[in-house]
Amino acid sequence: MAELLPVCALAELPPGAMRLVMHGDLEIGVFNCAGSVYAIEDRCSHDDGPLVEGSLDERACTIECPRHGARFDLRTGRPLTLPAYQPVDTFPVIIDDDMIKLEVG
Ligand code: FES
């Protein structure tokens, strides 16, 4: 059974906000795109760039890697632009009693 990783209260991650959570060796970026929350591994598939430090486009629901500019769809983890061509892992987000939780493992 998947483990639920608590992140924070929904009110602590308003639209446009992002935060980093750790789960063992894994770093996960959690993003609020215009009211919808998504979580992806915080490691660009091109060269390990820290995606949570990148630029969030809430309307398109994408994050741009701060290192070489690849853009990823936060809903799917798929790259939309080079130089990345492999997806990054995504994690299901559960809102439980106004708390954000991630399904991990
Ligand atoms: S490390 Fe992300 S685009 Fe190169």
Image (cartoon, helix red, strand yellow):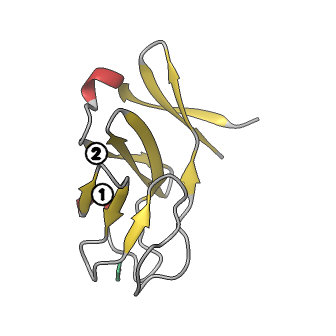
Residue 71 found in image quarter? bottom left
Q: Secondary structure at mark 1?
A: helix
Horizontal relation, residue 90 to residue 8: left or right = right
Q: Nearer the viewer, residue 1 or 10?
A: 10
Ligand 1 picture quarter: bottom left
Instruction: Estimate the x, y position of residue 74 in percent, counting from the top left.
Output: 44, 55
| Quadrant position of residue 46 | bottom left
Kind of residue at badge 1: Val
Query: Element type at marker 2?
Result: strand
Q: Residue at x 52, y 62 (%)?
A: 77
- Relative to 85, say whether 2 is above or below: above
Residue under circle 2?
18
Q: Which residue is mark 1?
A: 52
> In this picture, is 68 found above or below 28?
below
Q: Label 2 neighbourhood size at 10 Å, few (<14), some (14-19), many (20+)?
A: many
Numbered tag placed on residue 37 in the rendering: none
Count residues near mark 1 (Cα–Cα under 10 Å), then give few for <14, some for 14-19, many for 20+: many
Who's the residue at 58% across and 41% down the image? 92
- Give the residue displayed 42% in from the left and 38% down from the top: 37
| Residue 55 location (% of width, % of height) | 23, 61
